[in-house]
């Protein structure tokens, strides 16, 4: 899922001989999408979006014009940047300003992608092959020093995995960080939650006691974990994972809650619950020795406060909105200068 666009691009080039990758590389003021938003354009169809209606329509026109120029003798890895003032040029009310990178890639342009995760794709805006880094020591002497430092910081975790233009190069992390999320229960609510969360930045592990409880088709990227004791999956989840509990059994729900809260290294713990169920779980968790701080941290009920509704779809949308807010707050916190950085030293 993390590199689906690259697979699609490769398939499109194999089928048509050429495709254009369109990417927002700078956005000032009010803009419809952020830096890194992109689409892949072929002669008849395209995937992805850079948003904005008129902006996207104009970008499609220019991409198709580039496709029509195939075979005109230009050098490989053709690359150009266009500036779009959204208000004056396109009549959009947002009135911002974006820089859009157009890359025409043909079957003669070899994409040598290494295996592995956490890849960073980079290339000079002036042209030249795509290059990849997967380790902070993969930097090359041909890369400008600011680019080498930027890539190292991304791969070491010292810098957020966000696309940026650095010293005339476009640096694009390919494997966005996806929050591990353990969802317990493949009933009606669980299915609705998976449907809503599938295209959001979560690495979903769907836990239940029987394969027959899952739908016939499970979305790509969702991993089924079948266990007679779902609490055992909670005990082996990675640190910082989020846990959402909604099985068919209150007894199983409680065991999972106890396992998650007992570890203490979770990022989120929530159980679908009424006020009565929460009160019962609170009492039993105390009796089991779970700390008051951990019990207070348990979200029961789940989702956004004030958004009522017991229908599976409503619960799923409420939970997804709550989760997106939490991810956004976490991303904002990660961009704040640390205490030593803010003071300019240790």
Image (cartoon, helix red, strand yellow):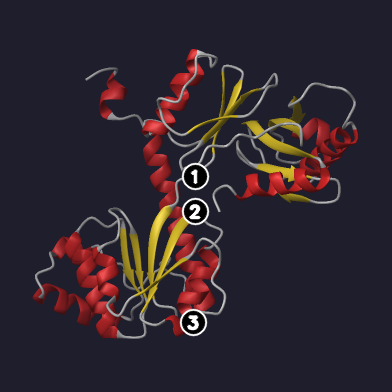
- The numbered dot on residue 176 is 1
Disc number placed over residue 292 in the picture, else none: none
Q: Point out the image quarter for the N terminus.
A: bottom right
CA separation, marks 3 and 2? 22 Å
Q: Disc 2 marks which residue?
A: 201
The answer to whether residue 278 is seen in the rendering is no
Query: Where does the image place residue 283, in percent across and percent down from the top left?
Result: 15, 78
From mark 2 to mark 1, how far is it between C-alphas?
A: 8 Å
**Which residue is under mark 3?**
188
Mark 3 or 1 closer to N-term?
Answer: 1
- In the shown orientation, is residue 193 left or right of residue 266? right
Residue drawn at x 81%, y 51% as measured from the top left: 45
Q: Position of residue 319 (x, y in %)?
A: 45, 66
Q: CA distance from mark 3 to mark 1?
A: 29 Å
Q: Position of residue 37 (x, y in %)?
A: 63, 41
Q: Are marks 2 and 1 in contact (CB under 8 Å)?
A: yes
In primary-sequence order, the first of circles 2 and 1 is: 1
Q: Are marks 3 and 2 in contact (CB under 8 Å)?
A: no
Q: Answer yes or no: is residue 37 visible.
A: yes
3 or 2: tag closer to the N-terminus: 3
């Amino acid at each position: 899922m993390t590199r689906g666009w690259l697979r699609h691009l490769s398939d499109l080039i194999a089928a048509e001989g050429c495709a254009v990758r369109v990417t927002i590389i700078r956005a000032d003021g009010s803009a419809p999408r952020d830096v890194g938003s992109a689409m892949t354009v072929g002669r008849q169809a395209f995937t992805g979006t850079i948003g904005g209606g008129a902006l996207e329509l104009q970008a499609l026109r220019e991409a198709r014009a580039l496709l029509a120029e195939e075979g005109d003798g230009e050098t490989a890895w053709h690359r150009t940047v266009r500036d779009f003032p959204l208000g004056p040029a396109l009549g959009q009310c947002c009135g911002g300003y974006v820089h859009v990178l157009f890359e025409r890639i043909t079957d003669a342009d070899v994409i040598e992608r290494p295996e592995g995760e956490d890849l960073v794709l980079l290339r000079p805006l002036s042209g030249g092959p795509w290059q990849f880094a997967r380790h902070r020591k993969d930097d090359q002497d041909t890369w400008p020093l600011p680019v080498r430092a930027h890539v190292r910081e991304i791969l070491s975790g010292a810098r957020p995995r966000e696309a940026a233009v650095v010293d005339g190069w476009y640096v694009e992390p390919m494997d966005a960080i996806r929050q591990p999320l353990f969802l317990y229960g493949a009933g009606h609510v669980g299915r609705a939650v998976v449907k809503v969360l599938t295209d959001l930045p979560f690495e979903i592990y769907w836990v239940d006691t029987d394969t027959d409880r899952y739908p016939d088709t499970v979305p790509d990227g969702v991993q089924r974990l079948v266990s007679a004791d779902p609490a055992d999956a909670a005990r082996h989840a990675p640190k910082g994972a989020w846990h959402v509990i909604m099985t068919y059994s209150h007894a199983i729900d409680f065991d999972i809650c106890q396992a998650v809260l007992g570890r203490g290294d979770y990022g989120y713990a929530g159980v679908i619950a009424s006020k009565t169920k929460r009160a019962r779980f609170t009492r039993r968790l105390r009796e089991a020795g779970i700390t008051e701080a951990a019990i207070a941290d348990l979200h029961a009920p789940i989702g956004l406060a004030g958004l009522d509704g017991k229908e599976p779809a409503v619960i799923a949308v409420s939970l997804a909105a709550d989760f997106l807010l939490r991810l956004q707050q976490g991303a904002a916190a990660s961009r704040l200068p640390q205490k030593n950085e803010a003071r300019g030293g240790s």
